[in-house]
Image (cartoon, rainbow, N blue to C red):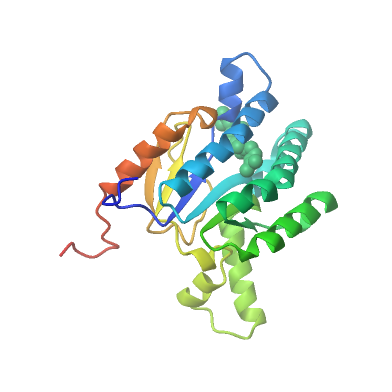
Amino acid sequence: MDKTKKIPHHVGIIMDGNGRWANQRGKKRSYGHNAGSANVDRIVTHAFNSGVHALTLYAFSCENWARPKEEVDELMRLLEAYFKKFMKKVIKNKVRLNVIGDVSVLTPSLQKIIAEDVEKSKIYTDHVLNVAVNYGGRQEIVYAVKKLLADGKEVTMEGISENLYTAFCGEPDLIIRTAGELRTSNFLVYQGAYSELYFTDVLWPDFDEAELDKALDSYAGRIRRYGGLVK
Ligand code: FPP
């Protein structure tokens, strides 16, 4: 690791392109989601080994329910399989898992495994992995405002920030989107207001360690002004 390089504290990733990856190989979309799922750990490991503290992965948006049932079921199956294996790997890497989004509509078995992983991994502080499931950035803002009102508090920018799902790990410094689309699709809408954006044409299953290094190098060269001037 280059200790002089500016490393983002918190990185968000929109893992796009599984369907196209499968299509290019003449396979069904589920084949791409399996390949995409298999890619998660190498990127999580490489990000943390590179000095990133928190990683937020967009796994399933509130809008993804509109996909065919077969595809939704496959994504839920992959998530459950991932969370089932999570604790075995996390002990070595000291990763705290946080699942962001409205998990109340997920199957009881998926909710149970998520709750167990989240509870058991709470002791780890080195790294944070946020997995966004049934997540939407606008929905998250509504959730935060409702929480403030329910607590009898004034609605302020600080108050909203403090009640976002990701409040405890800070705003994302860098948001990466794979597979060529130039939008952020309801991901980290409020906390991403000043995030640096990195887009690549590489499809998620092909986004390997070298591609993540390119994104981190791009971030290292950015000058962040937050609306002010560079001194
Ligand atoms: C976008 O590709 C990807 C998704 C909607 C799902 C992302 C899920 C995974 C990578 C697997 C499960 C996640 C974890 C954390 C284990 P797309 O289907 O929109 O691709 P396309 O734009 O090429 O059709």
Quadrant of the frame with the C terminus? bottom left
Q: Residue at x 37, y 58 (%)?
A: 194
Is 62 located above or below residue 202 in the figure? below
**56 sits to left or right of 3:** right
Residue 142 picture location, percent across and down: 61, 66
Q: Quadrant of residue 95?
A: bottom right
**54 sits to left or right of 211:** right
Which residue of the protein is positioned furthest toward the left in this rendering? 231
User: Can you tell me which quadrant of the image ligand 1 is in?
Assistant: top right
Towards the viewer: 149 or 221: 221
Residue 213 picture location, percent across and down: 37, 38
Quadrant of the frame with the N terminus? top left
Is 164 located above or below residue 108 in the figure? below
Towards the viewer: 87 or 228: 87
Q: Can residue 183 be seen in this snapshot?
A: no
Q: Residue at x 46, y 40 (%)?
A: 177
Residue 189 picture location, percent across and down: 50, 57
